[in-house]
Amino acid sequence: MSAPRSVFFVSDRTGLTSENMGNALLEQFSELAFKRSTHPFIDSPEKAHALVAQINATAERENIHPLVFSSVVNNEIRAIVKTATAAHFSFFDAFLGQLEQELDKPARHTVRSRADDVVRYDARMEAVNFALNHDDGVSDRELQEADVILLGVSRSGKTPTCLYLALQYGIRAANYPLTPDDLDSDDLPRMVKPYRSKLFGLTIEPSRLHHIRQERRPNSTYAHLNTCKQEIADAQAIYRRHAIPFANTTHKSVEELAVEILQACKLKRRF
Amino acid sequence: MSAPRSVFFVSDRTGLTSENMGNALLEQFSELAFKRSTHPFIDSPEKAHALVAQINATAERENIHPLVFSSVVNNEIRAIVKTATAAHFSFFDAFLGQLEQELDKPARHTVRSRADDVVRYDARMEAVNFALNHDDGVSDRELQEADVILLGVSRSGKTPTCLYLALQYGIRAANYPLTPDDLDSDDLPRMVKPYRSKLFGLTIEPSRLHHIRQERRPNSTYAHLNTCKQEIADAQAIYRRHAIPFANTTHKSVEELAVEILQACKLKRRF
């Protein structure tokens, strides 16, 4: 196997767009190895020239063109970056001209301050606080205010999913852990019963749950594989009996889960 | 002002890349209004045809081409989406050919299952649990294990930043609230003193902090504008005296803050 190819993600902002774009493309070549580095806030000609020197040194050392994925908005800085000895994939070069033509307007070509406006910040904070307040136990008032209520047995992945929904979409997600009593009952848990349309269930592979619980309470009944199997079977029976949409967290990323929940519960992002 | 132009973000996965790409471009035309919708998991010809019908109906109703930002990997589905009456901005069409040539390999052209592998899932869970455990108070052991320790007065934005670092980068971020005693002292707080290289300070505009605290404890001394001003001045004096890098959360998004912290503390993402 050849040496990993060097990859530079370059941006005059956070670099999230260029990382995102570059990784989506590189994933199409999963048999190859890459050595990635991210270079955010390249927002002055000086920083751009320093980066070019670094890319050129890499090209010379490795004797092959590095890949440069760039989402630099500023024309002057983008032009400097493009002087580097590299294969350039420039996001704004590829699309901005066509978009200007389509919209019949010139683009600003400048970086906007990305400060959250107060509305966005408040929605996010409120949603994060909402998720955190519900991490252990939850009141009826809170369930009433929730946009969505995630059900699941202990350690099935409810908390990270709630937090991701809050941070990424400003969604107020409450967290309802299914207790042994809930799992034994044919009925929906009393507290969540009035909110059936907001419910979404999580499930997980028994062996994975066993592994996670073992880390937490080694060799307990709680962590035993049979306990995990039984609890998961009971939880899935509840979801099916009450036609609650659910997803298996074992085979999904938090990002995928969040989008699936938005779709299933017909939720819109709050910012 | 003309009616908002309809925008479709289309993907055979979560839609995060197409939203990201489209919004970065549309932001360059901030004087125009757009009506955005996201269409994730378009992963079958049937779903693609249904979407095309929806785009065409929009084009006819609004008498103008909608904008379609697509990050569909699958060739067949991408070809169907492109039959819609719209201005198409297709991410993979723009770059994949060039990348295939550069890497001298054909791309897979298929969606990879995006399941977090176990390593990634564990890193994320561990980091989220780490952030949550430290929300109130923190032990020396935990500070020792932290990748970074965020300092700041109450409600200055530490918690969402810690959680974002955990979810996005798998970074273990601890949260150290500066108490009145800490703020009165010329020295660094005893607990964090051994970890100076891990410290990053948050600050915030007094009027903004006042607003946030008012929501929480209206008309308290805690929320009073003068209290906010004094605490923030004291916190900044600590950061300056001990050469601790810091940032103002008022004018930054959580995304920007996170990247700035990674840079300042020379941290690498854990996945």
Image (spheres, coloured by chain):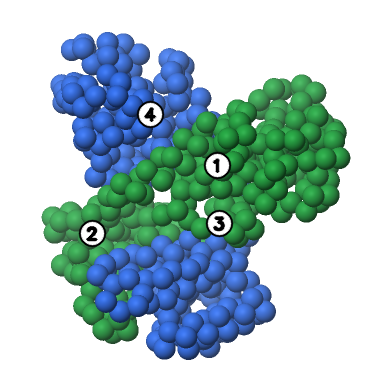
Chain colours: A green, B blue
Rendered location of residue B144, percent (x, y): 42, 20
The residue depicted at 60 percent of the width and 39 percent of the height is A143
Return the residue at label 4: B216
Name the kind of residue labelled 1 in the image. Glu
Name the kind of residue labelled 4 in the image. Arg
- Which class describes the residues within 10 Å of circle 1: few (<14), some (14-19), or many (20+)? few
The residue depicted at 75 percent of the width and 35 percent of the height is A190
Element under label 3? loop
On whether disc 4 and disc 1 are found on a single subunit, the reply is: no
Q: Which mark is residue A267?
A: 3
Rendered position, B88 above or below B134: below
Q: Along the line of sight, which residue is nearer the eye, A219 or A196?
A: A196
- Which class describes the residues within 10 Å of circle 2: few (<14), some (14-19), or many (20+)? few
Return the residue at label 2: A112
- Which class describes the residues within 10 Å of circle 3: few (<14), some (14-19), or many (20+)? some
Name the kind of residue labelled 3 in the image. Leu
Are the residues at dot 3 and dot 2 in contact (C-beta closer than 8 Å)? no
Are the residues at dot 3 and dot 4 in contact (C-beta closer than 8 Å)? no
Rendered location of residue B19, percent (x, y): 44, 64
Rendered position, B111 above or below A120: below
Chain that bears disc 3: A
Determine whether, in the image, residue A164 is placed left or right of residue A246.
Answer: left
Chain that bears disc 1: A
Distance from disc 4 to disc 1, alpha carbons, whole Å, reads: 17 Å
Element under label 2? loop
Kindly tell me whether residue A75 is visible in this rendering: yes
Return the residue at label 1: A145
Q: Along the line of sight, which residue is nearer the eye, B248 or A134?
A: A134
Name the front one of labels 1 and 3.
Answer: 1
